[in-house]
Image (cartoon, rainbow, N blue to C red):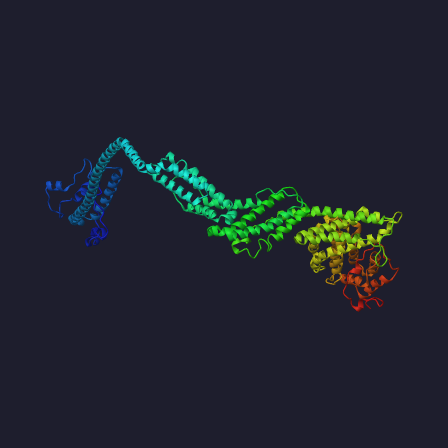
Amino acid sequence: MNPMCFPKPAPGSCPRAWQEPPSSFSEGPRPRLQLRESTLPALTQTLAPTPTSSPVLPGSAMDSATKDEMQPSLSPGSSCPGPEWPEQERAEQLARGAALKWASGIFYRPEQLARLGQYRSREVQRTCSLEARIKSVVQSYLEGVKTGVWQLAQAFEAVQGTREALDQAHGLLQGMVETTETLKPLREQVAQHRQLQVLSQLLPRLRAVPAAVAHTRTLIGAQRLLEAYVCLRELEQLQEETWAPLGGLELPVFEGLGPLAEALGQAVEAAAGVAGRLAREDPALLVAAVRVAEVDARHTTSLELPPRDWQRRCLQALQEGLERTHFGTPLLLEPGALAGWLEALRVALPAELATAEALVAPCCPPHYKVVRLWAHTLHSGLRRCLQQLLEGPKLGAADAFALLHWTLHVYLGPEMMGSLELGPEADVSQLEPLLTPENIEQLEAMFVTQIQVNVAQWLQKALDGEVAEWNREQEPGTDSSGFYHSPLPAIVLQILEENIRVTSLVSESLQRRVHGMALSELGTFLRSSSVSVLQPDGAASGDLAPVEAGLDELQRRICRLVLEALLAELQPLFEALPSRRWLSSPELLDDVCERTVRFCQDFRRVRNPAVQLLLAEAERTVVLQYLRALMQGRLVCRGADERIQAAQRLQNDAAQLRELFLGLGLEESVQCTPVLLSLRDLLNLRDPMLLGLEVAGLRQKFPDVSEDHVSALLDLRGDVSREQRLAALSSLQAGPQPSLSAGHRALFSLVPVPTPALSSCLPSGPCA
């Protein structure tokens, strides 16, 4: 059955039978309506609505024509139009089932058949309404499609018209190209006619060009630069007037303008190159050259010519001429002649700057900054000349000294670049140093090396003269006291002092270098084999012992001066020793070792035996500071465990210091670190009753240990009673007192300790 035959009523508009049965259905028993299967299709067809008929009441009669008119046209074998796709067939089946179910519900009782016409009329109205709405929608869509088709047709006609117009335009353009090609010879003829017209107008002036070029060359040769430049500009203007109309065609008559302009530029350069002389002799020529360069810098031209850049060439010529005047020739000086050349520069350069300020500057524009240009040019030329001088043969000591003194003091002094007469426009503060730090280092090393050779020769000559004096037959000279007198020490010191004093006029660095060289040469002089010549034949070798003792004492004084710096570094570190942190960590001594190693690194440059003396004194200084820290009473062990820790720390520290100085090159036999091992034994002793033996052994090894030192060490143990302390201290007085050996080095006697309490002193002790 077609779905359109029995549509489902909308909610709210369904028949009353769908909502509730009529009242007659609720009374009495419901008789069942027996519908045979063969009667359902006929009943369904009877209930199907028709689009044109009005509702018919039950029992009314209709003729067959009216019934046929009310029935929709159906395909053979079906009650609805055949499906156009598979889904339609399924929808029809569902609609049939729904219609049957609805009809069964409506006509369940025979009494309901009386309202069949009403239901049919309602369904017919609904079907008509749906068909009208569908027809309206389809009609609207059809009108839109019709409008779109019409617009597409109009657009197609417009495109066709545009294409035809473009084809016509393309044809016209092709015709114009062909016409243009035919007019090309005519255009060429017109251009030639215009060129001939211009040439005919300029022909009188063009004929005069060769004469004008020759006249301009004459003016250049006569150094009438401004007039020559005016003539050149007139010729170039004529060239511009012919160049544009001729389409950039160069006439042969103008071929000489390029060389002519170059000749004028060279004349301007030549005048600028001798600006100093022209400012004194012919300032008008200098002014003309500068004005030509300035005017040409502001000139623009339409000719495709390379830039002349006369202004830059003029400035460059000014600089090159100035350098050529003072530094043009290679500097080839005889040894010792450099001081004279530098003195000549001392006079010439300030005079040149004065000339620039008084004469050259008024001839040039202000933006030339002539005084600054002169100062910087002279400085750069001198700097380059000095660099070439240093790259040449090695200078002698006198020349190196003269160059250092002149560049560091004279050149920047009030007589030259530091002159008050030199105005701020010179801007000398921006000048680079004449000599780089590398140059100064080179000259100082050169001077010191050569002066060292000279000093060695002078000392040797003085020594040879002293030997010859003592080997004479007559008696040597005496002083006012009647003792033999030798001028050798005064001569040696005078030679060294004079060299040191002279170098103070140059720089502190050179003075330090010469001072170090003087000490080195003095040491070499004292150790020279020529001293043995002063010893009489047959005299004992011990005659020189006082001199050697004096030298030894001098060495020890030098060692003390050197080690004062080490002592200043180590004292703050030993302030934290001993402590609880010291017991558990080697960090404190690691810092001491690190500072000591860094300080002693420079000792490797010292020769033996002096280096052994320095290392021995350094090791002794470290041990003395260690002992001094132990004697201050900063730590008292609180039990056996801490005493064991302290003893172990002393052992480890002693081993670390021993390895440290062995690594630095100090022989083990002269080290003082064994004293720490002796103190370790004193702390490591478990039975305090045996302290007397340990103290006696300590006194035998180190005779300068005192009661105060022993008492401080016993305080460090923290477990010694008063009786045990007195017994241990009494062992210092018992037995023979040890004698100090010749090679003994004092340790404990150099270690101060705090004043102990009276209860810890012996009655006969120094603190009683």
Asked if residue 642 is positioned above or below residue 533 in the image, the reply reads: below
Residue 760: x and y in percent read: 80, 66
Residue 77, located in which quarter of the rendered image? top left
The residue nearer to you, when weighing 151 against 420, is 420
**What quarter of the picture does the N terminus occupy?**
top left
Residue 593 at least partly seen: no
Which is nearer the eye, 442 or 605?
A: 442
Q: Total marks drawn?
A: 0
Q: Quadrant of residue 335?
A: top right
Q: Is residue 727 left or right of residue 298?
A: right
Task: Kindly tell me whether residue 367 is visible in this rendering.
Answer: yes
- Position in image of residue 401 (x %, y %): 66, 49
Find residue 433 and report its horizontal and vertical position in percent: 58, 50
Quadrant where the C terminus is found in the figure: bottom right
Residue 334 against residue 178 in the figure, above or below: below
**Front-most of 145 and 262?**
262
The residue that appears at 73% across and 46% down in the rendered structure is 453
Residue for point 39% across, 39% down: 212
